């Protein structure tokens, strides 16, 4: 593939994946304002994020196999349209129940834009080349975690949290136009498979029984759960407990995103030099050590912000060694059903993330303990799954 086309493909794929990220990153600075205007508490507002995560997982299980049957472009456009419609409903939400429902539907739409581009990558690339394309795509994706929290914090502080959803509508339309002109169909007619429910279930069963698929998927799932636990819990911990303004929180969150995305640009070179297994293992060990240290300090009574930030930055930087490489390693053997593999993989990821964030919300006690405890438990699980994968590889 010519270099110019490679970079263009990476940009569009990254922006598509970023649709869901925009709906997360731009939204989180508004938790306190939403709770105040809709007369509820931050824990209940957090359920709107959990609802989004759940539907994002459910939607990916549906969109992925559909894209294997009808091609990649149609499901992408349908997902973007549903995302825009649900964003409009959320903008006018009169109650927290309405907002939670709108966020659930919004997640279903975002799923189409999130999972199908992963199949697009597998349609044309494997191994380090796929890792390079995904790493470049993350540069486009970085627009969301770097700029969206800052923009969201500004809108919350100076206008209204409702404006966030108007901006999300505009973003989905813009990305849809770019996709129309810059992303061709990557799944030719002769490679498409049946969309019959029985055929899809058989494909999913085969994937879930394949240990060399399941082990790296579970590693990636625990890594993403670590990420989403921080995304869901950090607004309360940093903004409420440490009295940081929404704008400054957005800047702080952007620093975390930069550490993750910046280091991920080295993934292709590191995979070629060290191999995916060693690279993922090093990242899992670092995340586990940093999470356990954070939990120990917070449970022990630490009140300072800077050690908290230093350790969470370490966690984000280490996740760069895990998320993309683990997921691509799982998908590599399944070119004929890349959409289904991406769907079941991301479905497992979001099921794990939803469970972790949901339990954290239910255990909310007005302290940072539920968040750091969740980080420690999930990161230890990730290291256990890596050990299972390493034994398999011997």
Image (spheres, rainbow, N blue to C red):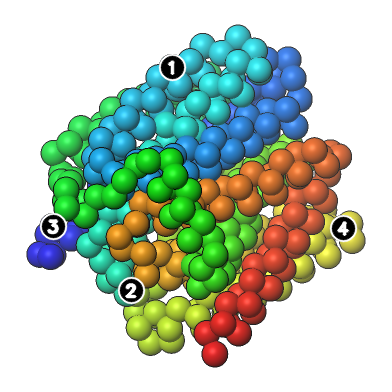
**Could you tell which of marks 3 and 4 lies nearer the N-terminus?**
3
**Which residue is the site of mark 2?**
127
Say left or right for 369 vs 64: right
- Between marks 3 and 1, how big is the CA–CA gap? 34 Å
- Tell me whether circle 3 and circle 1 mark residues in contact (CB < 8 Å): no
**Could you tell which of marks 2 and 3 lies nearer the N-terminus?**
3
Please tell me whether mark 2 or mark 1 is closer to you in this view: 2
Q: Secondary structure at mark 1?
A: helix
**Which quadrant of the structure image shows residue 224?**
bottom right
**Which residue is the site of mark 1?**
88
Residue furthest to the right in view is 300
* Mark 4, other Cα within 10 Å: few <14 / some 14–19 / many ≥20: some
- Between marks 2 and 1, how big is the CA–CA gap? 40 Å
- Which numbered dot is residue 5? 3
* Mark 2, other Cα within 10 Å: few <14 / some 14–19 / many ≥20: some
- Between marks 3 and 4, how big is the CA–CA gap? 51 Å
- Up-down relation of residue 67 to residue 288 (above or below): above
**Which quadrant of the structure image shows residue 389?**
bottom right
Please report the residue visible at 21 percent of the width from the left and 55 percent of the height from the top.
Answer: 191
**Which residue is the site of mark 4?**
299
**Could you tell which of marks 2 and 4 lies nearer the N-terminus?**
2
The answer to whether residue 210 of the structure is visible from this angle is yes
Percent of width and height locating residue 390: 58, 82
Please report the residue visible at 24 percent of the width from the left and 44 percent of the height from the top.
Answer: 71
- Between marks 2 and 3, how big is the CA–CA gap? 19 Å
């Amino acid at each position: 593939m010519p270099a110019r086309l490679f970079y263009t493909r990476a940009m569009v794929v990254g922006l598509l994946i970023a649709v869901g990220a925009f709906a997360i990153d731009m939204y989180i600075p508004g938790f306190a304002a939403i709770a105040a205007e809709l007369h509820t508490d931050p824990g209940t507002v957090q359920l709107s994020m959990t609802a989004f995560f759940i539907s994002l997982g459910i939607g990916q299980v549906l969109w992925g196999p559909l894209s294997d049957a009808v091609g990649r472009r149609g499901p992408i456009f349908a997902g973007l349209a549903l995302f825009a419609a649900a964003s409009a409903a959320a903008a006018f939400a009169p109650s927290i129940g309405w907002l939670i429902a709108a966020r659930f539907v919004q997640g279903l739409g975002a799923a189409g834009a999130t999972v199908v581009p992963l199949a697009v990558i597998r349609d044309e690339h494997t191994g380090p080349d796929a890792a390079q394309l995904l790493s470049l795509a993350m540069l486009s994706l970085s627009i969301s975690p770097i700029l969206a929290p800052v923009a969201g914090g500004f809108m919350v502080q100076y206008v209204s949290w409702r404006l966030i959803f108007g901006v999300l509508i505009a973003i989905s339309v813009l990305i849809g136009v770019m996709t129309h002109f810059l992303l061709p169909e990557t799944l030719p007619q002769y490679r498409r498979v049946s969309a019959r429910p029985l055929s899809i279930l058989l494909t999913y069963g085969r994937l879930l029984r394949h240990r060399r698929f399941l082990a790296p998927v579970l590693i990636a799932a625990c890594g993403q759960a670590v990420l989403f636990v921080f995304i869901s819990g950090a607004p309360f911990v940093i903004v409420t407990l440490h009295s940081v303004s929404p704008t400054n929180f957005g800047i702080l969150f952007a620093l975390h995103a930069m550490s993750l995305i910046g280091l991920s640009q080295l993934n292709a070179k590191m995979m070629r030099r060290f191999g995916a297994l060693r690279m993922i293992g090093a990242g899992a060990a670092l995340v586990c050590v940093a999470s356990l240290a954070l939990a120990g300090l917070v449970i022990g009574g630490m009140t300072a912000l800077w050690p908290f930030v230093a350790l969470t930055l370490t966690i984000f930087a280490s996740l760069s060694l895990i998320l993309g490489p683990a997921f691509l390693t799982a998908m590599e053997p399944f070119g004929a059903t890349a959409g289904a593999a991406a769907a079941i993989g991301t479905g497992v990821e979001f099921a794990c993330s939803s469970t972790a964030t949901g339990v954290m919300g239910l255990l909310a006690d007005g302290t940072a303990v539920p968040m750091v405890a969740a980080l420690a438990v999930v990161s230890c699980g990730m290291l256990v799954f890596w050990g299972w994968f390493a034994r398999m590889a011997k």
